[in-house]
Image (cartoon, coloured by chain):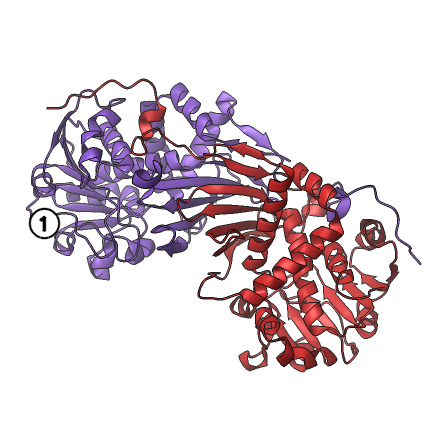
Chain colours: A purple, B red
Amino acid sequence: MDTLILSGPDIRRLVAHVGLDTLMDTLIERLTQAFEGYDAQTTRIPIRSGFSYDHPASGLVEWMPCLGASPQGSPHVAIKVVGYHPENPARHELPTILSTVSAYDTATGHLLAMMDGTFLTALRTGAASALATEALAVPEADTVGLIGTGAQAVTQLHALTRVRPIRRVLAYDVQPGVLASFPQRIARFGAHLTVETASAEAIVEQADIICTATSIEVGAGPVFGPAVPKPWAHFNAVGSDFPGKTELPADLLRQSFVCPDFRAQAIQEGECQQIDAEQIGPSLYEVLQQPDRYADQRQRLTVFDSTGWALEDHVALHLFLSYAAELGLGTRLPIESIWDDPHAPYALASTPTLATTP
Amino acid sequence: MDTLILSGPDIRRLVAHVGLDTLMDTLIERLTQAFEGYDAQTTRIPIRSGFSYDHPASGLVEWMPCLGASPQGSPHVAIKVVGYHPENPARHELPTILSTVSAYDTATGHLLAMMDGTFLTALRTGAASALATEALAVPEADTVGLIGTGAQAVTQLHALTRVRPIRRVLAYDVQPGVLASFPQRIARFGAHLTVETASAEAIVEQADIICTATSIEVGAGPVFGPAVPKPWAHFNAVGSDFPGKTELPADLLRQSFVCPDFRAQAIQEGECQQIDAEQIGPSLYEVLQQPDRYADQRQRLTVFDSTGWALEDHVALHLFLSYAAELGLGTRLPIESIWDDPHAPYALASTPTLATTP
C-alpha cells in the first residue's frame, strides 16, 4: 500500500505544465468555493499548535490539521507541518518557511500522499489574500504596497494581479538586498508592473491595497510609523502568526473593518490580539457566504488578518494532487509496514517456526 | 536538500539485519536512559490531539509531537501521526494501527526523515511495558496473561520475555481466529513458551503479569469480570487510549499502585480517567528516576497505564535512524521545494525576464 510523494522537482514540473496564472486562478476559485461552502459541523479545524524555541535558531515548528472532504467527497485528514525560521535565508540560503503536507484516508488511517508545503504555503497565502481583496477592496484598486518583499510578497502580488487591475507597486523591505531583487523575482508574471521603492509610511499613504509580510519580531510591531491611509485602503496582514507578533498599529485596526481568516486563531496569534472581541468583524468565510451584506465595506478601511488557515492547505493539497494525478507526477513508496497477517508484526522477520501449543 | 524515507521494506531489512531480540533489547535500553534522563524543562511533549469519527469507518487520526534532543545532542522535533481503525484487520487486512513518524531539524525546520510508524508503534509499546514490568513486577514472574492477542500482544510478550523469565502464556481474545493464530505469530521468538487459552478471568487470577491490549469500545470496559489477581500481579493496560475507553475495573485500580506513562494524558484517555487524582501514582519516568523509593511496590498490585507517550516514539525513531545510517538503508527525496534564491518561489517557473524598474 503506497504513499504518493510529490517532491520539489515534481512541483516544478507541475507548475511548468499548468502555468502560474492558471494555477493561481484555479486555487483562488477552489478556495472561494471552499470558503463559501465551509461548515464547521462537517469540516474540523483546530487552532494550530507548535513548538517555538530560541536555540539552535530562533524559530518554530507547527502542525495544522484539518478534517474535511476531498474533492471525491470522502473525508480526509490533511496535516501541514510548517517550520518558520527567519534566519534561514541569510544563514542557510533556505526559505524562511519550510513545510510538508500529508493526506490521510479516514477509512483506514493510511497515509495517502505527502507533498512539499513550501511552495504550497506561499501560493495559498497569496490566494487567501486575493479572496479577501476581492471581497473588501475597491474594484478599481490599481496600486499595491508591499511592506516586506520576501518569498510571501511574490505570491501576494501575483494573487492580487489576478483579482484587481494592478499597475503600480510600491515596495519596502528592511533588507536592501531583498528589496533590490524583488523586481527580478516577480518577472515571471509582473513584466507590466511598475515597481517603486518607498518608505513604509509612504506606502501606507499611497497604496490602495497594502500587504504586510514581514518577519517582525515579537513585540517589535507595528511595521510602519504614523501614516494616514486612503479611506478605502485594504490591508492584507500576512506576517502576524504568533503570540505577540503583530504588524499593524492597533489604532488602524480600531478604525477598520477587521476580517480574520480564522477568528479563534487570530485572537491568539493574529492582529486580532490587539483589539477587543467586539472590534473583530466576521471571518472571511462569513463575508464570502453573505457577499451582499458586506459589499459596502469596500468603501472603508478594511483589514484581512491572515494567520494561515488549515482549510487553505487542505484545498491546495487536493488541487496539487489532482494535477499530479492528471500529469502522472510523483513517486510511490510503501512507507507503512504492512504485514501479510495484520495481527503479525513479526511476520516481517525471518521464516516462522511454530511455537509449542498445548 | 533531501529527506530520508525509511519504508516498510527498509524496516524489514533493518530487522533482518539487527535481529528482533537485539532490536528490542536496544530499544528497552535507550528508553530506560531516556526515561531516567527525562526533564520536562528540556523535552516538550504536549498531550496528543486528534480527530475521531464514525464514518467512513469508526476510527481516529492523532498527532503526537515531541521536542527533544537527538542522540547527537541537537534538539529535534518528532511528530508521529497515528491512525487507529479497529475494523482494519477484518475489512481491509490492514493493521488496526497505521502510522508514520517524522523528524524535523530545529535549526531550519527541514524534514530530516520520515519513516514507518506501524512497526515502530508495536515495538515501542512493547518496550514501554518492559520498562514498567522491570520496575513493578516481581523478578521471578514467569506467567504472562494476554487479554487481546492482536498485533500489540506480539510485541508485549516479546518485550516481557526480555526482562522476566517468562515460560507460560495464558491468552484470550474475543475473536477465536485471532486467538488461534497467536502461537504462530510469536514463533519468531516464542518457541520455548507454552501458550494456553483461558478465559479473561482465569488469566487475571493465574498470571503474574497481565497485558490488556484490546480494541474495546468506548464505555464497554472492563475487559474482564470479577476475578482476584495474585497479590503481586502487575498489569500493563495498553489499550486504553481514548476518552471513555478503559480496560480495567475501577476497583482494581483503587487497590493498585497506578503508574501512568504520562499523567496529564492518562487522566484524559487512560485508565486514570476512572480514579481520583490522589489515587494516581507517579509517572513511569519518576519511578525509574527513583528506583529505591518504589522498589517495594513490586510486592503489591501494580498497574502501568500505557496511553502511549511521544517520548517513546522520539527514542524509537532515532534508534531506527541510527541503524538505517549504519546499514545504508532508505530512500532520499527532495520533498521540500528549495529555490536558488530563498525569496523567490517563482524561480521554479520558466526563464525569468526582468520587470520594469523605475
Above or below A105: residue A189? above
Q: Which quadrant holds residue A126?
A: top left
Above or below A284: residue A193? above
Identify the residue at image location x=47%, y=28%.
A322
Asked if residue A301 lies left or right of residue B164, the reply is left
Give the x, y percent position of residue B43: 48, 61
The residue under label 1 is A225
Numbered disc 1: secondary structure: loop
Residue A75 seen in the current view: no
Q: Nearer the viewer, residue A10 or A293?
A: A10
Q: Residues within 10 Å of mark 1 (few under 14, many from 20)?
A: some
Asked if residue A143 lies left or right of residue A155, the reply is left
Instruction: Tell me the amino acid under the disc marked 1.
Output: Gly
Give the x, y percent position of residue A326: 49, 22
Q: Return the residue found at the far right.
A: A358
Give the x, y percent position of residue A216: 23, 49
Residue B37 seen in the current view: yes
Q: Nearer the viewer, residue B16 or A223?
A: B16
Give the x, y percent position of residue A268: 31, 58
Pick the quarter of the image with the N terminus of chain A: top right
Pick the quarter of the image with the C terminus of chain A: bottom right
